[in-house]
Image (cartoon, grey):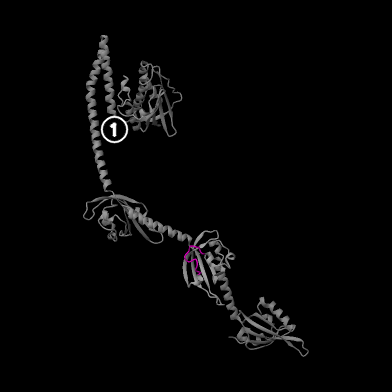
Amino acid sequence: MASDVAMEINAASRVVWISPAIEEVLGWSVEEIVGTSIFDRMHPDDVARGAKARDNVMTGSVVRNDLRFLTKDGSYRWVSARLAPVYDDDHNVIGRVAGWHDVSAEYELRDQLLDREERFRFLVENANDVVLLEVEGQVVFVSPAVDHILGWSPEDLVGRAVSSLWHNDDPSADHSPSLRADSSDVMRMRHKNGEVRWIEISTSPATQSDGRVGAVSILRDVTETVHAEQTLAATHARDAVLASMSSDLFLILDRRGAVLWASGASEFLFGRSSSELVGVNVTELLVGFGADVPNVAERLDAGEMIAGVVEVHPSGRPPRWIDVRAMQHSDPSEPRSWLFISIRDAHAEMEVRAALEASEREANEANQAKTAFLSRMSHELRTPLNAVLGFAQLLQLEELQPTQASAVDKIVSGGRHLLDLINEVLDIARIESGSILMSPERVALSNVVLESMDLVRGMAATAQVRLEPFDTSAVDEVVFADRQRVIQILLNLLTNAVKYNRQSGTVQVRVGSTDDGMAWVEVDDSGPGIAPDLLLRLFQPFDRLGAERTGIEGTGIGLTVARSLAETMGGRLEVRSTEGVGSVFTLVLPQA
């Protein structure tokens, strides 16, 4: 430690004498100091205090002051100076003497402590966690972060009992952290608004200088973490219960395909218990699964689910079909991924599917046989029927007796009816087998409506039913359909509207379009209408709804064929009817 320095300074503040210790303290020699002003070596910020000390000494006072002086190497050192007046024989102050003591080390330590305190205060005041100091259960200091976590200001809590912050139901609510040694715990504390928050508390004892027991606690809000853990625990418990109750088997595999975990149902599907499956490679269990899936590894890495049905061979049991679904899950926090596999017993389903496929094949074969039979029969029936009709028509040209003419007319009428029946039955068979041929094209509805109306005009005149004029001026609807099939449907609707109308009744045809790209044709008659309970049977083959007792000819399959043809062309056939008012049949087809 440096020695003390003594000096004498005159009234002009110049050094008259100084002890050799000055060189040890400031590095200057005695010769370099004597004769110079004391203020020349003083820190500029301390000159004012030095001048004030000089003035006080010159009035006869003894002054003690800490000042900084320049060293020879350019730095400054703190010295604690004691100045006393020097008197002449007349007791006038003619100067002063000073004793210096180097206190630089003390000031350096003070600066360090002040800097450390400032940093500590900054950290405490800006930390997200709360710093709480308590003495004998009373809060004596709390950092500002308590407002963010618990809604209280530091002023609200200082002086309060720490235990008043704990939740009443918390098992540690009646224990102050100051009574415990170094500890860490998660407890519930009350927010100012009454809400309960989960707080992680780390506590260390801090006995005060006066002997009182205290503690320093760091409080961190972990409410969201606790809630997430509770939710996760509930999810795990739920998943475990569901996995144990499910008849499906769930597997978790590592990156090499080894089983890490297996749920129940493993023994039924594989003949092994869940524990026996752990460590087994999945390729031993699911032979061939994914082999027919291109780029299966890349698709799993991309998070895509791979599914398929494979046949397994449990030990000592018959083979079984199982439905397998696999998906990969990657952990973003580490280079690790797992493969999740769910396995469902699909044996019964596959057996049912196989039976259905066999039944469908048989049905298709039977349907094809029926179509072939009907096709052959139609040709076989048409040949003699055409001969009958031909000869009957020749007889109509002869001059016959009235009774003979009537009999021939009945032969022609019955023959034509039978021919229509054969054609319609053949159409149904072709539609059901999917072998009916269509030639879709752009069809102007106004043209086919006029053509169809012309074909039934004679029939309407005979039945004394009026066909209302069809207005083509505003009709420009064009559909994409088979023209001949559209005419076939319209002829069926128009002939029905005439046959089942009343005497002096009317038939009206309208054309329009919908907002969904469809066009429609309505055939509106003024007949007796159809009862609601009979509408459900309207499209059943050979069901004439009692019309067979009226003497009106018909087969009962015309509407069935018409609706099937409409649906084959991408449209539909609709009906609405009111008893005593009439019926409206609507053909809807896609616009071209």
What span is in magenta?
166-176
Eyeballing the image, is 416 above or below 397? below
Q: Where is residue 245 in the image (x, y as percent from the top left)?
A: 33, 53
Which is more toward the observer, 549 or 130? 549
Residue at mark 1: 432
Within the image, what quadrant is residue 91 found in? Answer: bottom right
Q: Quadrant of the C terminus?
A: top left
Q: Where is residue 58 in the image (x, y as percent from the top left)?
A: 74, 83
On the question of residue 397 being in view, the answer is no
In the image, is 17 to the left or to the right of 313? right
Q: Position of residue 588 (x, y in %)?
A: 39, 30
Q: Which residue does the image show at 63% across and 82% down from the upper left?
A: 79
In the image, is 538 to the left or to the right of 385? right
In the image, residue 167 lies in the stretch drawn in magenta:
yes
Q: Which amino acid does label 1 sit on?
A: Glu
Which is more toward the observer, 366 or 17? 366
Judged from the image, the secondary structure of the residue bearing numbered disc 1 is: helix
Within the image, what quadrant is residue 550 found in? Answer: top left
